Image: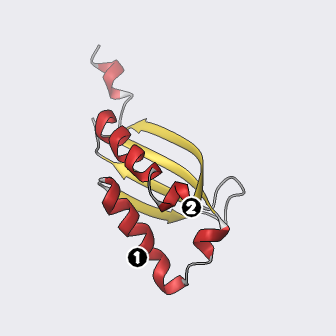
Amino acid sequence: MTQTYFLLLTALPAFLAIPRTRRDAAAWEAVAASGLTGVRFFDAEAFSARCSDVMMVEGMTPEAFHRAIEHLRDGPVFTTPWFRLEDVVVTLENGHQMMRSS
């Protein structure tokens, strides 16, 4: 079963100060340096007061995810900081099916 992580993020002034034409590249550079794989970004600010952005990370083992997040924490995403991490939601795709087979 595929494990998927949803990181609920709030963009902070330091990230918003980066020119719009450079923001995507800056975010993707930080993600690539961390080792995160299967990443997708979603804009949520127009629809939610809880967070401005959602980062979905798909298909990583818990150990690999942990290592990647530790690397991400050492970079500008959280040291400058560009974002505040509001919550992490960990899911198993079709996890309910495990109960059917037990």
- Name the one closer to the observer, 12 or 7: 12
Q: Residue 68, how many percent across, how many down?
A: 35, 47
Q: Are marks 1 and 2 in contact (CB under 8 Å)?
A: no
In this rendered view, identify the residue nearer to me: 89 or 68: 68
Residue type highlighted by circle 1: Ala
Q: Residue at x 42, y 44 (%)?
A: 5
Marking on residue 12: none
In this rendered view, identify the residue nearer to me: 57 or 102. 57
Q: Nearer the viewer, residue 97 or 88?
A: 88
Q: Nearer the viewer, mark 1 or mark 2?
A: 2
Rendered residue at 40%/76% (across/down): 25
**Residue drawn at x 32%, y 60% as measured from the top left:** 33
Describe the element under mark 2 as helix, strand or loop.
loop
Residue 20, x across and y down, in percent: 54, 83
Q: Which residue is mark 1?
A: 25
Q: Could you say where residue 40 lies in the image, as x and y percent from the top left?
A: 39, 61
- At x 29% / y 40%, what residue is drawn? 64
Instruction: Report which residue position mark 2 lands on.
Output: 80
State the quadrant of the C terminus.
top left
Quarter of the view holding residue 53: bottom right
